Image (cartoon, rainbow, N blue to C red):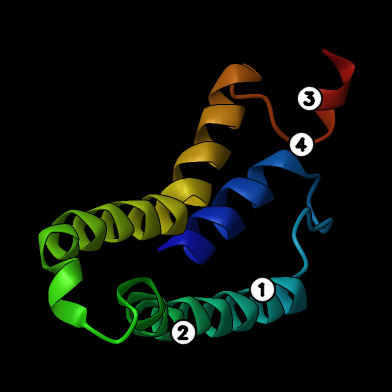
Amino acid sequence: MTISALLWIGSHFSASGDGVEEPLGLIIGSVIYGLAANVFYTLGWISELLWAGGDTSRTQPFRKPVFYLGLIVSCALTLLPAALIPAIWWMSGFHHGPEASLQ
């Protein structure tokens, strides 16, 4: 959804034939995002063991709040470009193409 929004809105910012976004950059960015998400997901249980000193019963009261916070932040981060790009387009007055640079 985010890549589609970036491609669609990006096509409105540029003149016909010019691309605002680099398709290869979007693909590489998606792969880097996926790898980073998996690294941080894996660090979750490792950090819990470190905080608890090996006794995970000590972290019981914090599990649900930390899980929900992580879920909300990861969803917000994932959807940020899909919300930010149309907002920028809206703030620029919905101008696109060569006439956008004249105004």
Q: Residue at x 41, y 53 (%)?
A: 79
Q: Are marks 4 and 1 in contact (CB under 8 Å)?
A: no
Q: Which residue matches tag 3?
A: 100
Q: In front of the other: label 1 or label 2?
A: 2
Q: Amino acid at mark 4?
A: Gly
Q: Could you classify mark 2 by the number of other residues whose Cα lies within 10 Å: few (under 14), some (14-19), or many (20 or more)? A: few
Under circle 1, the secondary element is helix
Amino acid type for the residue under numbered disc 3: Ala
Q: CA distance from mark 2 to mark 4?
A: 38 Å
Distance Cα–Cα, label 2 vs label 3: 40 Å
Please provide percent x and percent y for residue 27.
65, 80
Q: Which residue is mark 2?
A: 38
Mark sitting earlier along the chain (2/4) = 2
Determine the CA span between mark 1 and mark 2.
14 Å
Going from N to C along the chain, the mark reached first, 1 or 2, is 1
Q: Secondary structure at mark 2?
A: helix
Q: Is residue 38 above or below residue 76?
A: below
Q: Amino acid at mark 1?
A: Gly
Q: Position of residue 10 (x, y in %)?
A: 66, 49
Mark 1 surroundings within 10 Å by alpha-carbon count, few (fewer than 14), some (14 through 19), many (20 or more): few
Q: Residue at x 12, y 76 (%)?
A: 57
Please name whichever residue, 43 or 56, is drawn nearer the observer in this view of the structure. Answer: 56
